[in-house]
Structures are given as C-alpha cells and as structure tokens.
Image (spheres, grey):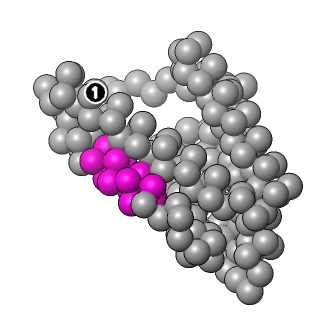
Amino acid sequence: MTKLKKIGNLLLGIFLMIAGLSMVAVPKEGAEIALFLLSLLLVIVGIRGLILYFTMAKHMVGGKSILYLNMILLDFGLVSATMVGQSKLYLILYLIVANAFAGVVGLLKALEERRYGVNSWKFRMFFAIVNMVIVVACLCSVGSTDTLVRIYGIGIMAAGLGEALKVARKEEVVYVQ
C-alpha cells in the first residue's frame, strides 16, 4: 500500500468514525446525513473508476470488469442520492441492505484469502462478521427508527475503525509462478 493510499484510508476511517458518532448522537438527522455521504462517496468512486477505465484500464486484462463495477457503483450512488428526502425507515432499510451486501462480499473475500493462504483473512473475516451482526441487530429492532440509526451508526464506526487499522496491517506480496 502506498503512503498516499495509507493516508487516504486513515482519513476515510476517521471520517467514518465521525459520521457514525454523529448518527449515534443525533439519530433524527443521522440517517439522511449517512445516506447523503454514502451516495456522494459512491458517485465519486464511480466517476473516478470510469475515468480510470477510459484513460488506461480499457487496454488492461480485466478492464471490462472495472468498467462494469464502476458503472454499478455510479448507478448505486445516483439512486441513493434520489432517496435522501424519503422516509427514514426506507433510508435505514436501504442502508441495511447495502451493509448486508458489504458483509457478504467481505465474507467471500476473506474465504478466498484464506484459500490462498493470505494471513489477513482473519481481519477481513472479523469485520465482515461485524457487518452481518449489525444487519441482524438492525433487523431485530425495526420498530424504532432512532434505535436503527444508532445501531447503524455503531456499524459505521466499526467500519471506520477497520479502515484506520488497515494502515497498520503488514502487507503481503503474492508472487505468481
């Protein structure tokens, strides 16, 4: 991981922890703020990935997957942006689905890393399980939107902690023979 990427992960982790803390402290506006930030982040990442594709990745192996992934991220971000003014319950359920998707993808990546013998699979598995626990806790307390926002805020703080801890993780280089 480059120094710039480490700084970016650390800033993202701090940003997520502050966003999660604001959701726990002010649950009335927390869901809308979280969805706005999520949609903004997805739009920025999608556009950045599309620029990468059109400038360089279309000539790379797997370039089409980069194009498709970033088109999906951009679309997901734009759909999220249109939902900001909707009911809080719908917003939280939307965020729960996004968190469940992230947890499942994290579990699959952790299992793949374990299969290849990468030592960091335990780290990824732990945070994927935390995501899934947050989803289950949110589904169990669907009656109160304030409780849902607070639980989801704790999940965002955990994700921020995971991003910040990635900086200190030892890197492994995998050689292809």
Task: Give 148 or 170, whichever is nearer the viewer.
Answer: 148
2 relative to 70, above or below = above
81 vs 4, left or right, is left
Q: Position of residue 124 (x, y in %)?
A: 62, 47
Q: Secondary structure at mark 1?
A: helix
* Three-letter code, disc 1: Leu
Residue identifier under label 1: 52
Furthest-left residue in view? 59
Task: Verify whether residue 146 appears in magenta.
Answer: no
Q: Would you identify the image quadrant in which residue 165 lies?
A: top right
- Magenta stretch, main secondary structure class: helix
Quadrant where the N terminus lies?
Answer: top right
Q: How many marks?
A: 1
Please name the residue shown 63% across and 19% down the image: 7
Q: Would you identify the image quadrant in which residue 135 lies?
A: bottom right
81 vs 14, left or right, is left
